[in-house]
Image (cartoon, rainbow, N blue to C red):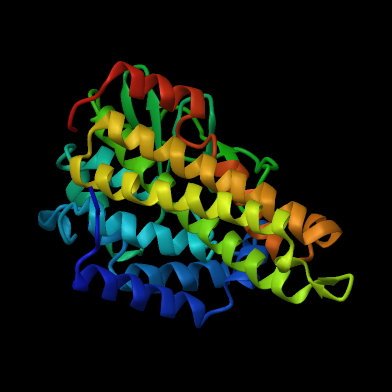
Amino acid sequence: MRFLLDAEQRAFAESLGAMLTSVDTPSAVRDWSRGEHARGRALWSRVADAGVFALAVPEEYGGLGVRPVELAVAFVELGRHAVPGPLVETVTAAALLSETDPAAKRLLPALASGEAMATVAHEGSYALDGDVAGTRLALAPDGLHLSPGHGPVRPSLDPARRLTPLTPGGELLTPAPPLGRALVTARLATAAQALGVGLALLDKTVAHVGQRTQFGVPIGSFQAVKHRLADAKIALEFARPLLFGAALTMDRADVAAAKVTACEAAYTTARTALQLHGAIGYTAEYELSLWLTKARALRTAWGSPRECRDTVIQGGDRQ
């Protein structure tokens, strides 16, 4: 089965990609890693103005209605450009809050408009970007809480993914949040983001091997190099229809399959990119590192490969 985007969806991807290409996202990522959020917040506002976060919010709360396919389209572009911030967590928070009226009426409009960022974590674990998110949701045994604060920032595998513990307690928003739907949303967005990261890494590596020479010829002409790039390309292209097929069904097993496939493809592409770039690929100063570290971090975000495979084996249902 082939999953092709329609003209409107393609135009959305192209316009979002063009907007992100026009700004200096690597500088925003590096600033974000240092805890300097001005550029990242400005970029966040532009992403919100494009309607990305509104795609996860029901219309009655200021959104465009929950539209998983368009959300996946957007997150591929966000991953392709390495946009920093709690992107997945904000749309996951929207899924958690959508059935918690009156909290939804109070919190969701700001998420849809980009006025607020959100982060989500289980009580006692680390939340992404808790120092900048205005809405911090903590999942506790008695339900979903609005955390009143956060602890110190901890280092992460990806410097742009800043981890903080959430302060326990706070307002109880609901004793029974829709955890299943929220997890499916988080995994779909993570899969799309990983696919975009992998596609960017492949493009950058293809360009590099066409310029780097050895024995007087570009290394991209070597058969072994072609094989590695072809394997990465096939893995990414195999993940693409799984992603959009899962966005259509929103079945937990389908989404888990898409998540593990896209993240493993991105991780494989990252390893290929690192090998073919040589020593320069290891340097933090080189922009490639911004995508390399993200590919590795997304691999286990919102479910490790083993957890996702277990979900596929168990089967799923629509959320």
Q: Quadrant of residue 7?
A: bottom left
Does residue 173 appear anywhere in the picture? no
Vertical position of residue 207 compared to residue 242: above or below? below
Count up the numbered dots: 0
Q: Quadrant of residue 223?
A: bottom right
Where's residue 293, x and y in %? 66, 49
Q: Quadrant of residue 49?
A: bottom left
Query: On the rendered structure, is 84 left or right of 104?
Result: right
Residue lying at the far right of the rendered structure = 215
Where's residue 148, x and y in %? 44, 39
Does residue 55 appear anywhere in the picture? yes
Q: Residue at point 41% right, 46% down?
A: 239
Where's residue 52, x and y in %? 31, 63
Q: Residue at point 57% right, 55% down?
A: 230
Q: Nearer the viewer, residue 280 or 300?
A: 280
Q: Nearer the viewer, residue 294 or 111?
A: 294
